[in-house]
């Protein structure tokens, strides 16, 4: 009898703890540490400025530092990127600037950035960006990732022989190195990182969290 | 029985720690409460993936299994048997080895400390210690009173 009572009390306490845990996680949405002020991101006119989507007159610029090999970057691209493009960039509220930040540790990452940059030479960076991010699982640990990237090049309709030539010559390497160095200079140490309205945010985020940050940046821009 | 209750509670805590890290990683949580940025560095490193799975996600699954076994071990059918405790110790042992490997990576390879990962490491060690202690006590009790009690 006493044991049954003990068990009942335990279950009650266990469920109470579970409810508290769920509540704490729920409360943590959008909470946590404060973003770091980094000021405007310097865009060196003589250096490669990254890939830009959206209107020059958009009041807010989101600068994303990403590594195609990082899983959190792919999560962001898949779960948030599409909404951001359709609902913020296309609506003229946001300009999205993508900066390559190739880390040393993700296998095949450099090949992916080369592929995207080579597609960029033919004006199709964003189409290749989507292919690479949405299919990360396919190429990230493949011994021959170049085959996947060639497939993507063909799928997005660019000249594959010109693409191959660019990849073989590794023409975009200097711009990739410069982009990474500029990131390091403003304090980027992990990907994805975002500079929104002069504040650095580290890690992927939901569309709802992103909108809050964009609204703050819009309000700051109006002042 | 008590040790299984303790393990269930510790597993629940570990589950929420892993859930928090995983939700942050997939972008559900805005920023992570970590202090010095070590969690971001660790969670966004290549070592936060293990055979294509997020380590935080694996942690969630691991703690859920521990929780399920410990709760099942409280049911009348299993309460007096030692198998659930053996299974808990074996599973927690795997968790301890994996946590030791991750802690080594933090210290020697990534050179950053994720506080939530350390909390998780402490929890899995605690689960292992609680389970192992229960097994040892049961064994000692069996040796001293071979006919009075055959179960932990």
Image (cartoon, coloured by chain):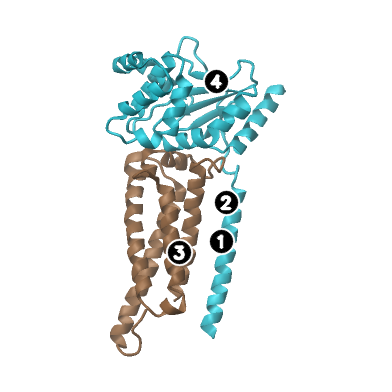
Chain colours: A cyan, B brown
3D distance between C-alphas at marks 4 and 2: 34 Å
Measuring from the top left, give residue A48's x and y in whole percent: 45, 14
The outermost residue toward the right is A223
- At x 46% / y 34%, what residue is drawn? A73
In the figure, B146 relative to A193: above or below?
A: below
Quadrant position of the N terminus of chain B in the picture: bottom left
Callout 4 and callout 3 share a chain: no
- At x 43% / y 13%, what residue is drawn? A122
Label 2 marks a residue whose chain is A
- The answer to which quarter of the image holds residue A135 is top left
Q: Is residue A67 visible?
A: no
Q: Which mark is residue B67?
A: 3
Secondary element type, mark 4: strand
Measuring from the top left, give residue B116's x and y in whole percent: 46, 50
Crowding at label 2, few (<14), some or many (≥20) Cα neighbours within 10 Å?
some
Q: Are marks 4 and 3 in contact (CB under 8 Å)?
A: no
- The answer to which quarter of the image holds residue A180 is top left
Q: Which mark is residue A18?
A: 1
Comes first in the chain, label 1 or label 2? 1
Callout 1 and callout 2 share a chain: yes
Secondary element type, mark 3: helix
- At x 42% / y 26%, what residue is drawn? A101
3D distance between C-alphas at marks 4 and 1: 44 Å
Label 3 marks a residue whose chain is B
In the figure, B74 relative to B60: above or below?
A: below
Q: Which mark is residue A53?
A: 4
Secondary element type, mark 2: helix
Comes first in the chain, label 4 or label 2? 2
Q: Which residue is mark 2?
A: A25
Measuring from the top left, give residue B42's x and y in whole percent: 41, 41
């Amino acid at each position: 009898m006493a044991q049954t009572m003990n068990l009942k009390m335990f279950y009650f306490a266990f469920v109470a703890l579970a409810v508290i845990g769920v509540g704490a996680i729920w409360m943590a949405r959008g909470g946590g540490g404060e973003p770091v002020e980094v000021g405007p991101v310097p865009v060196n006119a003589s250096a490669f400025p990254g890939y830009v989507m959206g209107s020059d007159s958009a009041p807010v610029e989101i600068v994303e530092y990403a590594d195609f090999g990082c899983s959190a970057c792919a999560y962001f691209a898949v779960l948030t990127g599409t909404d951001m493009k359709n609902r913020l960039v296309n609506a003229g509220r946001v300009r999205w600037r993508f900066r390559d930040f190739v880390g040393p540790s993700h296998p095949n990452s450099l090949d992916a950035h080369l592929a995207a940059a080579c597609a960029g030479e033919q004006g199709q960076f964003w189409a290749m960006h989507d292919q690479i991010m949405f299919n990360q699982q396919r190429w990230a640990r493949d011994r021959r990732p170049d085959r996947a990237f060639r497939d993507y090049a063909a799928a997005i309709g660019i000249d594959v022989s010109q693409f191959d030539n660019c990849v073989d010559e590794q023409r975009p390497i200097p711009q990739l190195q410069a982009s990474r160095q500029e990131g390091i200079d403003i304090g980027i140490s992990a990907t994805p990182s975002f500079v929104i309205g002069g504040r650095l945010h580290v890690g992927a985020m939901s569309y709802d969290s992103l909108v809050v940050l964009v609204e703050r940046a819009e309000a700051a821009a109006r002042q | 029985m008590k040790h299984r209750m303790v393990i269930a509670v510790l597993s629940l805590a570990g589950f929420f720690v892993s859930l928090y890290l995983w939700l942050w990683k997939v972008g559900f949580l805005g920023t992570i409460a970590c202090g010095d940025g070590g969690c971001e560095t660790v969670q966004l490193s290549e070592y936060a993936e293990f055979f294509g799975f997020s380590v935080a996600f694996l942690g969630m699954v691991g703690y859920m299994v521990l929780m399920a076994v410990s709760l099942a071990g409280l049911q009348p059918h299993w309460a007096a048997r030692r198998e659930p405790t053996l299974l808990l110790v074996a599973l927690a042992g795997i968790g301890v080895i994996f946590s030791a490997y991750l802690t080594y990576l933090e210290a020697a390879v990534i050179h950053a400390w994720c506080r939530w990962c350390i909390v998780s490491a402490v929890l899995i060690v605690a689960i292992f210690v609680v389970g192992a202690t229960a097994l040892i006590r049961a064994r000692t009790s069996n040796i001293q009173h071979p006919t009075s009690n055959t179960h932990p």
